[in-house]
Image (tube, rainbow, N blue to C red):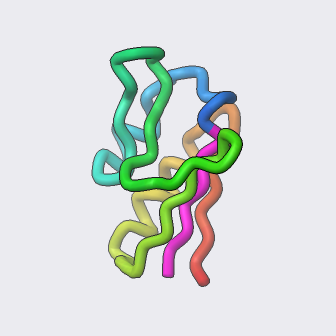
Amino acid sequence: MVVITLQRPKCIGCNYCVELAPEQFRMSKKDGKCVLLKATDKKGFHTLKSPDHSILESAEAAAKACPVKIISVKEI
């Protein structure tokens, strides 16, 4: 299981996550912040739990590239 967490309120809209992991992230046209696709929101923490391990590498690249370090990726 791959768990990706995004602290969306802290997003600065740099777009790195979308460039590196377009299967998981999109930019919102409303506020210019990133959106973690198919995620559940709990108090600003958007979480995606996926059994698809093929997304791990791109998600980790997006987390490393994020200048404000608001993306975390875990494999459980």
Please report the residue visible at 56 percent of the width from the left and 57 percent of the height from the top.
Answer: 47
Q: Position of residue 18 (x, y in %)?
A: 37, 38
Rendered position, 3 above or below 43: below
> What's the magenta bit mostly, secondary-structure-wise?
strand
> Which sits in the foreground, 31 or 41?
41
Count of marks overlaid on the render: 0
Please report the residue visible at 62 percent of the width from the left and 71 percent of the height from the top.
Answer: 74
Quadrant of the frame with the C terminus: bottom right
Quarter of image, res 69: top right
Q: Position of residue 25 (x, y in %)?
A: 38, 43
Quarter of image, res 10: top right
Q: Position of residue 63 (x, y in %)?
A: 57, 50
> Which sits in the foreground, 29 or 24?
29
Rendered position, 48 above or below 7: below
Q: Is residue 3 magenta?
A: yes
> Which sits in the foreground, 19 or 46?
46
- Taking 39 as reference, is 72 left or right? right
Please report the residue visible at 49 percent of the width from the left and 48 percent of the height from the top.
Answer: 62
Q: Position of residue 19 (x, y in %)?
A: 34, 38
Q: Which residues are magenta?
A: 1-7
Please report the residue visible at 60 percent of the width from the left and 35 percent of the height from the top.
Answer: 8
Rendered position, 70 above or below 51: above
Q: Is residue 12 magenta?
A: no
